[in-house]
Amino acid sequence: MADGRGPAGSSGESLLFLTDEQLRQAIEAMFFAYRGFTADPDRILVDMAYGRAHHRAIHFINRAPGTTVNNLLNILGVTKQSLNRVLRTLIADGLVESRVGRNDKRERHLFLTDAGRALEQTLSDAQRARMRTAFRDAGPDAVAGFRTVLEAMMDPEMGASYTRLKESGS
Amino acid sequence: MADGRGPAGSSGESLLFLTDEQLRQAIEAMFFAYRGFTADPDRILVDMAYGRAHHRAIHFINRAPGTTVNNLLNILGVTKQSLNRVLRTLIADGLVESRVGRNDKRERHLFLTDAGRALEQTLSDAQRARMRTAFRDAGPDAVAGFRTVLEAMMDPEMGASYTRLKESGS
DNA sequence: CTTGGAGTGTCAACAAGGCTGACGTAATGT
DNA sequence: ACATTACGTCAGCCTTGTTGACACTCCAAG
């Protein structure tokens, strides 16, 4: 495994800092960190009838108000059946509003209601608190590196969604 | 709340680089990156009868050969029933071997068989390939920052498991 | 030796949240 | 007119998580 290889890694001399062992550690760090990342909102959601899927939908509707179902589908990368199950409950509970499109009446544009925004705020406050602490402890340079690596890890398609959201939000 | 804030952020002047908007972007980056992170092994696993839970078990058994079920339970953070279901199939399929403990015969020590190691290799090769590319593109400084932030994001307990593995493996 | 408790395995039942396939409807584009 | 798109929905399946209950083995303490 990460054994009898000499100092020259499997990918060339410019990558000496990337031993298999270090990559393994990074993989584990990613695993444990993602658990921390979702832990706080998850704790809040269990008390309600919601799960992580609801959180994701709420997050991205808040981020791109008026987005269509199809657009959300692409961002989340799930089937319309999966998304619809979540959306149906959010609409029924009055957290999300679905408006028929003006130009194209086949489309449904999604918006958070006041109650939806309130929940979004609660969830993202919890999530941001941990991120803020972690970022503060790590420092600005580490944060910059963190984001650089995350962007490089994305699938190109997903990266495009990310960039679009990032630019619309700033 | 996250609205009409002036230049003084909600957490003090030394955190000016942490606006809510930047935290939101980091949250989204984490979401999209984790998808990329798991995509490659997931693609391999669907062809077999296995899922992500099997991958995780195989990964950590490979990392800490001879680990007990209870130890693995703590690392993975699932119930013994969930883990057992996965472990049972892996043992039945000859990828994992369970040996009764010598000192304490109640304990089962888990090892990968040759076949198990082969699958682990395949999966982690796929996962490492993406990480390696991302790390190469981002550069050593970014990678260092990446790991610093990830470690700061973990729950303290999980961070302890991570540190233990990290130190045993180096 | 008996007993309590820890470590483990297993059965049953259930829920969340993925998936596919199929079908219906309305609106749009050709 | 007809095909396609966008959406909703029903039915059924899978993985992976959960609780609760129970049995077994073994260690250690009384």
Image: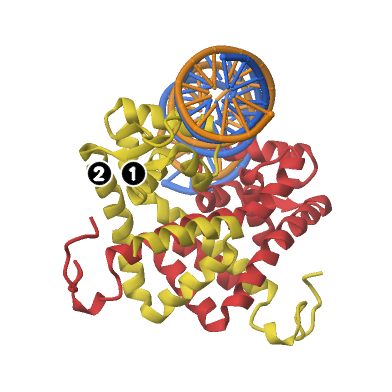
Chain colours: A red, B yellow, C blue, D orange
Q: CA distance from mark 1 to mark 2?
A: 18 Å
Residue on which the image places disc 1: B43
Position above or below: A5 against A53? below
Residue in the foreground of this view, choosing between A120 and B12:
B12
Neighbor class of circle 2 (other Cα within 10 Å; few <14, some 14-19, many 20+) is some
Q: Could you tell me which residue is drawn at 82 percent across and 69 percent down?
A: B1
Foreground: disc 1 or disc 2: 2
Position above or below: A160 against B13? above
Residue in the foreground of this view, choosing between C27 and D19:
D19
Looking at the image, residue B123 sits to the left or right of residue A39; the answer is: left
Q: Could you tell me which residue is drawn at 20 percent across and 70 percent down?
A: A9
Letter of the chain that mark 2 sits on in the rendering:
B
Q: Are marks 1 and 2 on the same chain?
A: yes
- Which quadrant is home to the C terminus of chain A? bottom right
Position above or below: B139 against A70? below
Q: Position of residue A80 (x, y in %)?
A: 54, 39
Q: Position of residue C17 (x, y in %)?
A: 57, 39
Q: Could you tell me which residue is drawn at 38 percent across and 37 percent down?
A: B109
Residue on which the image places disc 2: B117
What amino acid is at disc 2?
Answer: Arg
Position above or below: D24 against A109? above
Can residue A26 be seen from the camera position used here?
A: no
Residue in the foreground of this view, choosing between C30 and B115:
B115
Q: Which mark is residue A29?
A: none
Residue in the foreground of this view, choosing between A126 and A170:
A126
- Which quadrant is home to the N terminus of chain A? bottom left
Q: Position of residue B42 (x, y in %)?
A: 37, 44
Can residue B132 be seen from the camera position used here?
A: yes
What is the total number of numbered labels drawn onto the structure image?
2
Q: Secondary structure at mark 2?
A: helix
First in sequence, mark 1 or 2: give its number.
1
